[in-house]
Amino acid sequence: MGRFIVANVLAVIFAAWGYLFYQHEQMASQPMSGMWMPPATLSAWNLVDFALVYFMWAVMMAAMMLPSAIPMILAFGRVCRQQNKPSYQLTGLFILAYLVIWLLFSCALTLLQWQMHGLAWLSPMMDNQNPVLAAGILFLAGFYQFTPIKNACLTYCKTPVGFLLTEWQEGAAGAFKMGLKHGAYCLGCCWAQMLIMFAVGVMNLLGMALLTLLVISEKSMPLQSKFICKAVGVAFLVWGVFLIYPAF
């Protein structure tokens, strides 16, 4: 059953990355006159524009965040099997609730992108065209790495067994609530890092891949979370300085 759950999670991850790769190739190969692009003015956005941008962010969040949740998903399913509970159904609810948090966050990202297009901070191809903004995002992400809430959330994400021991709730409703709580901890850990996509280009596949690897590394490296947070924070701050220096 554990392998079946992992296979399903991996299928979702590969499908999400496949969609992102397809979208990236479409943007790279089609002429600008023949492709959809987010409107440059706020008033020009309609429901279809919001829906397309939201769907892009929702798929991106699933592609980038689900891989780092696999250890927690496996641990949850293992506990369910040990207690002779319906592992597949409960684990499915746990995963769904985890994704709900990131789907809600995608709403905020969509609104942010809407505003950035209106301010001409993003190009029609969704690339950053304001180095000060890019540096500001990196400074925000860097300074956030030094905050107690980042360290606390990362500690919960790095210890699946500890999370399950302290947060376990019975039944389908309990599984869903646990998924929401784990998703909230994960959001508290990684929300600032996700904003970096606005700095490197919203559809930058390399940026997505590197941030995904960073999130996985933060949660899996056998080091104290406080040390990891500070090391990554310094890297973001240095990167921000290099970006902003040419602007002046």
Image (spheres, rainbow, N blue to C red):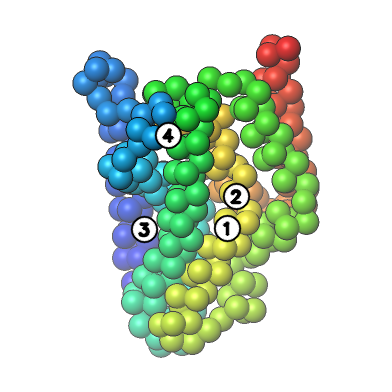
Q: Residues within 10 Å of mark 4 (few under 14, many from 20)?
A: some
Foreground residue, 23 or 76?
23
Pointer 2 with pointer 4, Cβ within 8 A: no
* CA separation in Å, label 3 and label 2: 20 Å
Which of the two marks, 3 or 2, is nearer to us in this view?
2
Q: Is residue 70 visible?
A: no
Whether 131 is drawn above or below 232: the answer is above
Chain-order first, disc 1 or disc 3:
3
Q: Position of residue 19 (x, y in %)?
A: 30, 40
Location of mark 4 (residue): 42
Q: At 46% across and 30% down in the image, what residue appears?
A: 117
The residue at the point 78 percent across, 47 percent down is 146
Amino acid carrying label 1: it is Cys
Q: Which residue bears the numbered disc 1?
A: 186
Picture residue at 47% right of the left edge, 44% below the top: 111
Question: Which tag is nearer the camera, tag 2 or tag 4?
Answer: 4
Determine the CA span between mark 1 and mark 4: 31 Å
Residue tagged 3: 9
Cα distance in 3D space between marks 3 and 4: 37 Å
Determine whether 60 is above or below 137 in the image. below
First in sequence: mark 3 vs mark 2: 3
Label 1, residues with CA under 10 Å away: few <14, some 14-19, many ≥20: many
Q: Is residue 21 left or right of residue 115?
A: left
